[in-house]
Image: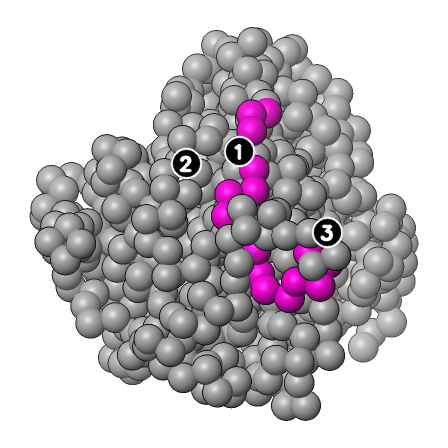
Amino acid sequence: MRHKYDEKKIRRVIGEKVQFVQGDASAVYGALLAGCSFFAGYPITPASETAELMSKLLPKAGGVYIQMEDEIASMGAIIGASWAGAKTMTTTSGPGFSLMQENIGYACMTETPCVVIDVQRSGPSTGQPTEGSQGDMMQARWGTHGDHEIIALSPNSVQETLDLTIEAFNLSEKYRTPVILLTDGEIGHLREKCVMPEKGEFEIIDRKGPTVGRDKYVPFQADESLVPSMARFGDGYHVYVTGLTHVEKGYPSTSSAEDHDRLVRRLVDKIEKNRKSITMVEKDYQKGSKIAILAYGASARPSAAAVRKLRRKRKKVDFLRLITIWPFPNEEVRELADRVDRIYVPEMNLGQLVHPIREAAEGRAKIIQVPRIGGPLHTPKEIMDAMRKKA
Amino acid sequence: MFNKARKIKEKYIQDEMWPSIFCVGCGVGNVLNYTLRAVDEKRIDIDKVVFVSGIGCSSRLPGYIDADGLHTTHGRAIAFATGVKAADPDLHVIIFTGDGDAAGIGGNHLIHAARRNIDMTVICINNFNYGMTGGQVSPTTPTGGFTTTSPYGNIEIPFDLCELAMGAGATYVARWTVGYPYETIQAVKRGLDNKGFSFIEIITPCPTGYGKRNEIGEGKEYWEWCKKNTILKSKYEALPAKERRKEKRIVMGEFRNRKREEFVEELWKLTKA
Ligand SMILES: Cc1ncc(C[n+]2csc(CCOP(=O)(O)OP(=O)(O)O)c2C)c(N)n1
Ligand code: SF4
């Protein structure tokens, strides 16, 4: 009994081609279109809607939905299911994302494709469950222990939530790594028009399987892509998967600096060396701008509005929106820092991505935080006011 | 027995992983032998078996088997295994776990998997302490037992793991010690036969950890200690009620073997509908 991708069935399950839905729903549609066949989760505001919709749609689309006993189990289950050949996903918010961290690291170390959607809410701790925030940007990067590289994307609309969920699956399959989609309570609960992409309008990437026979197969040996081919449990390849430092055959090697260095550097390099192709940004530059706004996710919406208003007043301003958050778009930020004198960074936190932005800018422009916490989005006016106060 | 062990080794053991990490006199390797014999006697296609484990000495077992293996995080074997089994119900899932792994950090997953009656066979190697980390107190350390973190004797009441599994809904439950190979092999076979959650506890010597601090000794002495401190279920049940209440030994035998709806089967009914 194995899942088969059946596009007709999936489209039937999703329904109308054009819908007016929440970001939490469009994430589910994106997952189904990408071929997700296994979902495990645990309810949490503001992500519960994804689990509810998955429980309704996924069995009809030929997949399996399980509500696990907690987020640790959810993360474990999607990793196990991925080795059994499924494309897998879980969704959560801050407190649950914290619980998932150990197993996210396990997925990095064992090169297990899977997707985690974090519909961010205001923390720390239980915080403000129904209020959106961008408080987990750094947790997504460094929440799990040890050296590693991670891929994280952040959408600013309901449509983009769908598109980036598909992209998240594709990147996780291509690089054999967990991919985090950082949405938030604002985008997750926002209702907007959403158009289901047609066949041919989006790509579906599947992990590559073994190309050699069982006796020649070396499970963690990579070619120049740095990504090994992945055998599925039950196909007779006898793969041993461990979170311990391991050699290419998969066996543990826990006291060799050389083996550890070789493995961890490859895990980092397979993402780091593809930073260019993973990076997605939206650029809107004007010749002669001296100032810029750099934003991402929900806070990119009032930021874009502020840019429009400023331009209406004939002020020149550049706008850069990060879609890929990790690996960090260093070059794009540096390029912007070369163009302007001051970069304003509205974030729904007290300053998270402002740090890698400053690092990437290398002093070529002044980086000014425009923080806001507690729930509501920035207003465009608030951003413009901050820009007036020439820091 | 010796010839059979050699046959099992040739057929199922991953030579490149040898020698094992286990201490002299450790009983974990015996459990591997018994489990593989049960798999062999049931003629299960090894390509369709996934051995899943958490973290601990006992959880290192899948690494020694020439089969698919998933060595997960501490306490989470059952959660990972739930994903494996639910995504591909054709796979047989066998879990090796320790007392700390299964009932300490992983207790929540254990009771929920038992409640769901998900088809998997959990082999819990109970050595009364955290062997891998140097012999700390565990949820099964007997009251009064000495460990590196119960230097004045354990003040806590231990779990009866089989009672716990049954209370949560497991459909096959048995307990043996490594000193009962045939009974253990039989229990694993019945666990594999059971279409549901099977929990088999095997009391296992850990001379380096629990043995040393409680002056149990090594090798033969430890196996004797296991025998001395356990009583067969049939004998226990034959005792007069008064003596039963006073009985301090751990009861051994098959406690449950019954049928109930299995989780993954129900899950896939929704998918096929
Ligand atoms: C989250 C986490 N906490 C703690 C540890 C350290 N640790 C490794 S093995 C272990 C205990 C193992 O005991 P048990 O499950 O009884 O297995 P045994 O070694 O006795 O076979 C602990 C606490 C860990 N690896 N991960
Ligand atoms: S510490 Fe105990 S359980 Fe671990 S290998 Fe040694 S004897 Fe076996």
The residue singled out by tag 1 in the image is B257
- Residue nearest the observer in this picture, A180 or B47: B47
Query: For the residue marked with disc 3, what is the amino acid?
Result: Ala
Q: Secondary structure at mark 2?
A: helix
Between marks 2 and 3 in the image, the one whose residue lies nearer the viewer: 3
Find the residue positioned furthest to the bottom: B151
Residue A34 spot, x, y in % from top left? 48, 29
Q: Horizontally, is A6 left or right of A54 in the view?
A: left
**Which chain contains the residue that carries disc 3?**
B
Q: SS for tag 1?
A: strand
Same chain, labels 1 and 2: yes
Residue holding disc 2: B190
- Magenta span of residues: B244-260
Viewer can see residue B182? yes
Q: Is residue B132 left or right of residue A372?
A: left
A183 on left or right of A171: right
Q: Please, which chain is the residue tagged with disc 1 on?
A: B
Residue furthest toward the front?
Answer: B240
Q: Is residue A360 above or below residue A326?
A: below
Q: CA distance from mark 2 to mark 3?
A: 30 Å
Residue A383 appears in the figure: no
Label 3 residue near ligand 1, CB within 8 Å: no
The residue beneath circle 3 is B241
The residue positioned 68% from the left and 56% from the top of the image is B244
Do the residues bearing badges 1 and 2 touch, measured as CB atoms within 8 Å?
yes
Res. B188 image quadrant: top left
Is the residue indicated by label 2 positioned so its CB lies within 8 Å of ligand 1? no
